[in-house]
Image (tube, grey):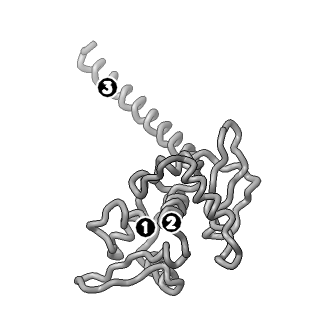
Amino acid sequence: MEKARTVPDSYPMSLVALLSGCNQKTSRDPIMTLSEAEIAEALGTLKDLALVRESSGSRVTRFEHNFQRGIGVPEQSAVILGLLMLRGPQTAGELRLNTERWYKFADISSVEGFLDEMLERSEEKGGPLVVKLARAPGEREQRWAHLLCGPVDINAPAAPAGSGNTSRLEARIETLEEEVAQLRATVQKLCAELGIG
């Protein structure tokens, strides 16, 4: 869904392009490391649900999403759901900013309108597609999460966006600091041996 809107020249996507997109390390929560076999299996499941179509006509089989029609939502709702799937729970304001490349919402209230519509979706249409999470400590706004993978705990406050990477980032910084300290010691030793101040 993202690539159809952001890089339309490379869409529909081959299995190799899907592998690269699924394992992308930026703007993802969670970050995944999928194999070609896992992606092929997921494509099979999505085709069975009529959420993906296979297209031919080139040397390589290509795939395109049918999400909007398959789920039965307007384009704006599909964009919001796509972003929630890629980046995890977000506030309406974050969604408006982060959807800029996919769709330009007029204001936050229009994003909230589509979120409310998906929250109040009738059982005949498949039930709610999003849920409003409890406010996280220190946060002014509540975050929204998608329900496409099943229910989520609405009472558990959502972690701020990107916080899942915090411990990994701290570990990386610590490793870099150790390397800098070792390099500094080596340079000082070399300078002392060479008589350089």
Query: x, y (%) of residue 18?
Result: 38, 70
Task: Tell me which amino acid carries mark 1.
Answer: Met
Q: State the residue position of label 1.
A: 1
Task: Tell me which amino acid carries mark 2.
Answer: Ala
> Which is more N-terminal, label 1 or label 2?
1
Residue at left offset 57%, top offset 56%: 88
> How far separated are the C-alphas under marks 2 and 1?
8 Å
Residue at left offset 37%, top offset 63%: 5
Query: x, y (%) of residue 75?
Result: 47, 66
Vertical position of residue 69 compared to residue 128: above or below: below
Q: Quadrant of residue 160?
A: top right
Q: Quadrant of residue 37?
A: bottom left
Mark drawn on residue 187: 3
Vertical position of residue 66 compared to residue 111: above or below: below
**Depth order, front residue of 88/95:** 95
> Which is more N-terminal, label 3 or label 1?
1
Q: State the residue position of label 2.
A: 78
Instruction: Evaluate if marks 2 and 1 touch, with contact meaning CB atoms under 8 Å apart.
Output: yes
Query: x, y (%) of residue 123?
Result: 71, 75
Q: Residues within 10 Å of mark 2 (few under 14, many from 20)?
A: some
Q: Nearer the viewer, mark 2 or mark 1?
A: 2
Residue at left offset 49%, top offset 79%: 51
> How far separated are the C-alphas under marks 3 and 2?
56 Å
